[in-house]
Image: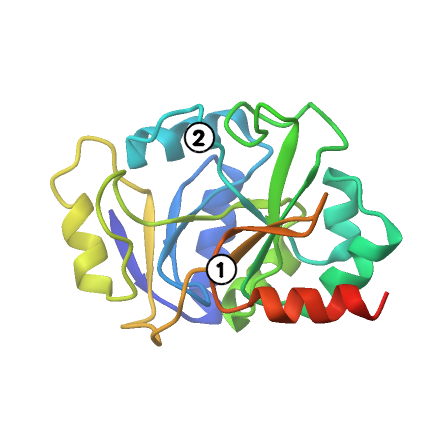
Amino acid sequence: MKILKINSENLKIVIDSIKKSGVIIYPTDTVYGLIADATNKNAVKKVFKIKKRNIKKPLPVFVKDIKAAKKLANIGKDQEEFLKKFWPGKLTAVLKIKSLKLPKGIISEESKIGLRIPDYEFLNLLLNKLDCPLIATSANIAGKKASRKIRRVLKQFETAKNQPDLVLDAGNLKQALPSTVVDLEDFKILRKGPISQKQISGFLEKK
Protein backbone atom coordinates (compact mmCIF):
# COMPACT_ATOMS: atom_id res chain seq x y z
CA MET A 1 0.00 0.00 0.00
CA LYS A 2 1.31 3.41 -0.95
CA ILE A 3 0.53 6.00 1.73
CA LEU A 4 0.07 9.66 0.78
CA LYS A 5 -0.81 12.73 2.80
CA ILE A 6 -4.08 14.36 1.82
CA ASN A 7 -3.55 17.45 -0.34
CA SER A 8 -4.62 18.76 -3.74
CA GLU A 9 -1.44 17.50 -5.44
CA ASN A 10 -1.96 13.92 -4.27
CA LEU A 11 -5.62 14.12 -5.29
CA LYS A 12 -4.43 13.83 -8.91
CA ILE A 13 -2.72 10.54 -8.05
CA VAL A 14 -5.96 9.26 -6.47
CA ILE A 15 -7.96 10.20 -9.58
CA ASP A 16 -5.49 8.39 -11.86
CA SER A 17 -5.63 5.31 -9.63
CA ILE A 18 -9.45 5.23 -9.57
CA LYS A 19 -9.53 5.49 -13.36
CA LYS A 20 -7.28 2.39 -13.45
CA SER A 21 -9.59 0.30 -11.21
CA GLY A 22 -7.78 1.32 -8.03
CA VAL A 23 -9.19 0.95 -4.51
CA ILE A 24 -8.30 3.73 -2.07
CA ILE A 25 -8.45 4.12 1.70
CA TYR A 26 -9.89 7.62 1.98
CA PRO A 27 -11.16 9.86 4.82
CA THR A 28 -14.89 10.63 4.97
CA ASP A 29 -17.27 12.56 7.23
CA THR A 30 -17.76 9.41 9.33
CA VAL A 31 -14.83 6.93 9.30
CA TYR A 32 -12.06 5.97 6.89
CA GLY A 33 -13.58 4.35 3.84
CA LEU A 34 -12.68 2.21 0.85
CA ILE A 35 -13.57 4.02 -2.35
CA ALA A 36 -13.49 2.91 -5.99
CA ASP A 37 -15.34 3.52 -9.25
CA ALA A 38 -18.81 2.07 -8.63
CA THR A 39 -19.35 1.55 -12.38
CA ASN A 40 -16.14 -0.47 -12.81
CA LYS A 41 -16.77 -4.21 -12.43
CA ASN A 42 -13.12 -5.03 -11.67
CA ALA A 43 -12.84 -2.27 -9.07
CA VAL A 44 -16.03 -3.42 -7.32
CA LYS A 45 -14.75 -7.02 -7.23
CA LYS A 46 -11.49 -5.80 -5.67
CA VAL A 47 -13.35 -3.99 -2.90
CA PHE A 48 -15.22 -7.18 -1.96
CA LYS A 49 -11.94 -9.16 -1.98
CA ILE A 50 -10.15 -6.58 0.16
CA LYS A 51 -13.00 -6.46 2.69
CA LYS A 52 -13.59 -10.24 2.52
CA ARG A 53 -17.24 -9.32 2.22
CA ASN A 54 -20.07 -11.47 0.90
CA ILE A 55 -21.01 -10.29 -2.60
CA LYS A 56 -24.68 -10.70 -1.61
CA LYS A 57 -24.32 -7.78 0.83
CA PRO A 58 -24.49 -4.74 -1.50
CA LEU A 59 -22.32 -1.69 -0.98
CA PRO A 60 -23.61 1.89 -0.86
CA VAL A 61 -22.44 4.59 -3.26
CA PHE A 62 -21.29 8.21 -2.99
CA VAL A 63 -22.60 10.66 -5.60
CA LYS A 64 -21.62 14.29 -6.17
CA ASP A 65 -25.12 15.79 -6.38
CA ILE A 66 -28.86 15.12 -6.82
CA LYS A 67 -28.48 15.10 -10.60
CA ALA A 68 -25.96 12.26 -10.35
CA ALA A 69 -28.27 10.40 -7.93
CA LYS A 70 -31.14 10.67 -10.43
CA LYS A 71 -29.05 8.89 -13.06
CA LEU A 72 -28.87 5.85 -10.79
CA ALA A 73 -32.20 5.80 -8.96
CA ASN A 74 -35.84 6.74 -9.31
CA ILE A 75 -36.36 9.85 -7.19
CA GLY A 76 -39.86 11.35 -6.81
CA LYS A 77 -40.70 14.93 -5.84
CA ASP A 78 -41.12 14.23 -2.10
CA GLN A 79 -37.97 12.13 -2.06
CA GLU A 80 -35.99 14.88 -3.77
CA GLU A 81 -37.20 17.47 -1.25
CA PHE A 82 -36.19 15.14 1.57
CA LEU A 83 -32.72 14.58 0.10
CA LYS A 84 -32.15 18.30 -0.42
CA LYS A 85 -32.89 18.81 3.29
CA PHE A 86 -30.33 16.26 4.50
CA TRP A 87 -27.68 16.16 1.74
CA PRO A 88 -24.75 16.69 1.87
CA GLY A 89 -24.65 14.82 5.15
CA LYS A 90 -24.82 11.60 7.09
CA LEU A 91 -27.87 10.15 5.35
CA THR A 92 -27.76 7.08 3.12
CA ALA A 93 -30.92 6.89 1.02
CA VAL A 94 -32.13 3.51 -0.21
CA LEU A 95 -33.95 3.96 -3.50
CA LYS A 96 -35.32 1.92 -6.41
CA ILE A 97 -32.64 1.49 -9.06
CA LYS A 98 -33.10 3.13 -12.45
CA SER A 99 -30.62 0.96 -14.38
CA LEU A 100 -29.54 -2.64 -13.83
CA LYS A 101 -26.23 -2.06 -15.64
CA LEU A 102 -24.23 -1.44 -12.47
CA PRO A 103 -21.80 -4.19 -11.36
CA LYS A 104 -22.84 -7.04 -9.08
CA GLY A 105 -22.52 -5.99 -5.45
CA ILE A 106 -24.12 -2.55 -5.86
CA ILE A 107 -27.77 -3.46 -6.41
CA SER A 108 -29.79 -5.33 -3.76
CA GLU A 109 -32.06 -8.31 -4.41
CA GLU A 110 -34.99 -5.86 -4.20
CA SER A 111 -33.44 -3.81 -7.07
CA LYS A 112 -32.49 -0.98 -4.72
CA ILE A 113 -29.35 1.09 -4.24
CA GLY A 114 -27.96 3.04 -1.28
CA LEU A 115 -26.82 6.57 -2.17
CA ARG A 116 -25.23 9.42 -0.21
CA ILE A 117 -23.69 12.83 -0.80
CA PRO A 118 -21.01 13.10 1.91
CA ASP A 119 -20.05 16.27 3.74
CA TYR A 120 -16.25 16.19 3.67
CA GLU A 121 -14.30 18.75 1.64
CA PHE A 122 -11.66 16.50 0.07
CA LEU A 123 -14.15 13.77 -0.72
CA ASN A 124 -16.61 16.19 -2.30
CA LEU A 125 -13.75 17.68 -4.30
CA LEU A 126 -12.82 14.21 -5.56
CA LEU A 127 -16.42 13.40 -6.51
CA ASN A 128 -16.66 16.64 -8.48
CA LYS A 129 -13.44 15.98 -10.37
CA LEU A 130 -14.46 12.41 -11.27
CA ASP A 131 -17.30 11.62 -13.65
CA CYS A 132 -18.44 8.52 -11.77
CA PRO A 133 -20.14 7.48 -8.52
CA LEU A 134 -17.88 5.90 -5.90
CA ILE A 135 -18.16 2.82 -3.71
CA ALA A 136 -18.75 4.05 -0.16
CA THR A 137 -17.85 1.40 2.39
CA SER A 138 -15.90 1.55 5.63
CA ALA A 139 -12.20 0.65 5.43
CA ASN A 140 -12.22 -2.55 7.44
CA ILE A 141 -12.18 -6.29 6.90
CA ALA A 142 -15.62 -7.88 7.34
CA GLY A 143 -16.27 -8.63 11.00
CA LYS A 144 -13.72 -6.09 12.24
CA LYS A 145 -14.44 -2.56 13.41
CA ALA A 146 -14.41 0.49 11.18
CA SER A 147 -12.23 3.29 12.53
CA ARG A 148 -11.56 6.99 12.31
CA LYS A 149 -7.95 6.37 13.48
CA ILE A 150 -5.53 5.88 10.61
CA ARG A 151 -3.14 3.52 12.45
CA ARG A 152 -5.97 1.14 13.34
CA VAL A 153 -7.15 1.14 9.74
CA LEU A 154 -3.67 0.41 8.35
CA LYS A 155 -3.06 -2.37 10.87
CA GLN A 156 -6.04 -4.35 9.52
CA PHE A 157 -4.60 -4.44 6.02
CA GLU A 158 -0.81 -4.49 6.52
CA THR A 159 -0.52 -8.29 6.33
CA ALA A 160 -3.61 -8.95 4.19
CA LYS A 161 -3.27 -10.84 0.92
CA ASN A 162 -5.52 -8.35 -0.87
CA GLN A 163 -4.69 -4.74 -0.08
CA PRO A 164 -5.94 -1.33 -1.21
CA ASP A 165 -3.81 0.38 -3.85
CA LEU A 166 -3.45 3.71 -2.06
CA VAL A 167 -4.01 5.30 1.34
CA LEU A 168 -4.90 8.98 1.77
CA ASP A 169 -3.78 9.85 5.30
CA ALA A 170 -5.68 12.73 6.93
CA GLY A 171 -4.66 11.79 10.46
CA ASN A 172 -7.30 10.82 12.99
CA LEU A 173 -10.78 11.94 11.97
CA LYS A 174 -13.33 13.68 14.18
CA GLN A 175 -15.60 11.37 16.14
CA ALA A 176 -18.84 10.76 14.23
CA LEU A 177 -21.70 8.29 14.02
CA PRO A 178 -22.20 6.17 10.88
CA SER A 179 -24.81 7.58 8.51
CA THR A 180 -28.51 7.05 9.10
CA VAL A 181 -29.85 4.63 6.48
CA VAL A 182 -33.40 5.36 5.31
CA ASP A 183 -35.52 3.46 2.79
CA LEU A 184 -37.20 6.28 0.88
CA GLU A 185 -39.98 4.04 -0.39
CA ASP A 186 -41.66 4.36 3.03
CA PHE A 187 -39.20 6.71 4.82
CA LYS A 188 -38.30 3.92 7.25
CA ILE A 189 -34.99 3.96 9.15
CA LEU A 190 -32.95 0.82 8.44
CA ARG A 191 -29.95 1.88 10.53
CA LYS A 192 -29.96 4.50 13.27
CA GLY A 193 -27.52 7.38 13.02
CA PRO A 194 -27.24 11.17 13.41
CA ILE A 195 -30.57 11.85 11.67
CA SER A 196 -33.42 10.82 13.96
CA GLN A 197 -36.90 9.45 13.32
CA LYS A 198 -38.20 12.69 14.85
CA GLN A 199 -36.45 14.74 12.14
CA ILE A 200 -37.81 12.46 9.42
CA SER A 201 -41.32 12.56 10.89
CA GLY A 202 -41.09 16.34 11.11
CA PHE A 203 -40.38 16.53 7.39
CA LEU A 204 -43.26 14.19 6.56
CA GLU A 205 -45.73 16.12 8.74
CA LYS A 206 -45.10 19.25 6.69
CA LYS A 207 -46.06 17.46 3.46
Asked whether residue 87 appears in the rendered view, the answer is no
State the residue at coordinates (67%, 47%): 131
Mark closer to the chain start, 1 or 2: 2
Residue at the spot of label 2 = 57
Q: Quadrant of residue 202?
A: bottom right
At label 2, the amino acid type is: Lys
Residue at image point 72% right, 43% down: 185
In front of the other: 81 or 4: 81
Choose between 205 and 28: the one closer to the eye: 205
Q: Is residue 105 above or below residue 114?
A: above
Q: How is the image coloured?
A: rainbow
Residue 39 coordinates in the image, percent (x, y)? 60, 33
Whether residue 171 is visible here, answered yes or no, is yes
Sort mark 2 into few (<14), some (14-19) or many (20+) by Cα contacts within 10 Å: few
Q: Taking 18 as reference, is 54 above or below it? A: above
Distance from label 1 to label 2 (Cα)? 17 Å
Which numbered tag is attached to residue 179? 1
Q: Which mark is residue 92?
A: none
Residue at the extreme bottom of the image, as rendered:
174
Please indicate whether residue 28 sits to the left or right of residue 205 in the image: left
Nearer to the camera, 196 or 175: 196
Q: Nearer the viewer, residue 34 or 13?
A: 34
SS of the residue at dot 1? loop
Left or right: residue 137 compared with residue 60: left
User: Tag 2, which secondary structure?
Assistant: loop
Q: Quadrant of residue 55?
A: top left
Could you tell me residue 124's position as x and y percent? 58, 64
Q: How many marks?
A: 2
